Image (cartoon, rainbow, N blue to C red):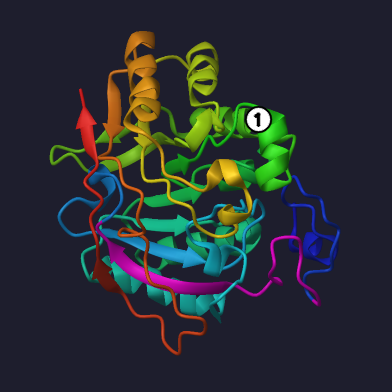
Amino acid sequence: MSYSQMFSCNICPRNCGIDRTKNKGYCGVTDKLRINLATRHFGEEPCFSGTRGSGTIFFAGCNLRCVYCQNYEISTLCWGKDISVEELIRLMLKLQEEGAHNINLVTPTHFTLQLREAIIQAKEKGLTIPVLWNSSAYEKVETLQLLTGLVDIYLPDFKYAHKVYAQKYSSAPDYPAVAISAIKEMFSQVGLLKLDEKGIAQKGLLLRMLVLPNKLAGCKENLYTLTEELGTELTLSLMGQYYPAGKAKNYKELTRGITLSEYFEVVDTAVELGFTKLYTQEISSSDTWTPNFSPAPEEINPVSEFNPQLELTL
């Protein structure tokens, strides 16, 4: 793959074919890096946030654009500020200087080519903390292969088991098949999650599942798929923080939070299948742990905030 692909973009499964050097792709952005917030984030799993925070950079735009997205303002409305690769590199190094445990690239897929170059240059200029790829897993294997040896930690979602719901809420009926292929590629690159002596992640894969109301995500089915494809040594984060955001109010079945029974049915299934490395959450149906995004931030400076109380079950 080369940057010429931006002239007819096909870096993600959408294959929208838009000339992103001139126009916005399906993802909602051009080829210019666009970010909204950079923060030492204390709301990730403890192995990422630690005591000094995860150096989290939120990118505007998204190639999946779920109707219930909790970051709707930046994923779909694309609030943010355009920056250069050089500015992004300086921001990464600034987060490292301020003590962040890692560089956490949130919703990075549509900027893969630009980020590959940024990571290479940042490491040449002294970036030593792990680079974390925080994505929806709606990614091409060949695009992910560009990141081999550059990304230390993959943090993918596994959103849907059934194509009918993937189509209804994300306009991506191929999501289940695409995601498992992407997750397997990620795993082949970095393996199981490895922590240092202080419990901070250094390399590997942690997979997230957001439990939706009415079993719409098919989390139990996805747990069976993971057991068959990758085994039960994987580290999982089972998230109970769904609340109706974005356009969820237009879908009756998405207008409430999840129940305790819905959440613990997923947790119990994971335990029964033999998963032992599980992050679990207190159930929450509010936006308490969602960052406050600005429509057009004048400056992007690292700040610190929030803590969603994720716990590791051993």
| Residue 158 place in picture, x, y as percent | 53, 34
Horizontal side, residue 313 vs residue 166: left or right: left
Location of residue 172 by image quarter = top right
Q: Residue at x 24, y 69 (%)?
A: 304
Q: In this figure, which residue is indicated by the disc labeled 1?
A: 176
Q: Residue at x 64, y 29 (%)?
A: 181
Q: Residue at x 75, y 45 (%)?
A: 13
Residue 266 sits above or below residue 155 on the image:
above
Instruction: Please provide the residue range marked out in magenta.
Output: 22-42
Say which of 311 and 179 sits in front. Answer: 311
Whether 76 is among the magenta residues is no
Residue 161 at least partly seen? yes
Q: Quadrant of the C terminus?
A: top left
Furthest toward the front, the residue is 252
Residue 279 sits above or below residue 292 on the image:
above
| Residue 105 place in picture, x, y as percent | 46, 58
User: Which amino acid does the dot numbered 1 rest on?
Assistant: Pro
10 Å crowding of disc 1: few (<14), some (14-19), many (20+): many
Residue 149 sits above or below residue 306 on the image:
above
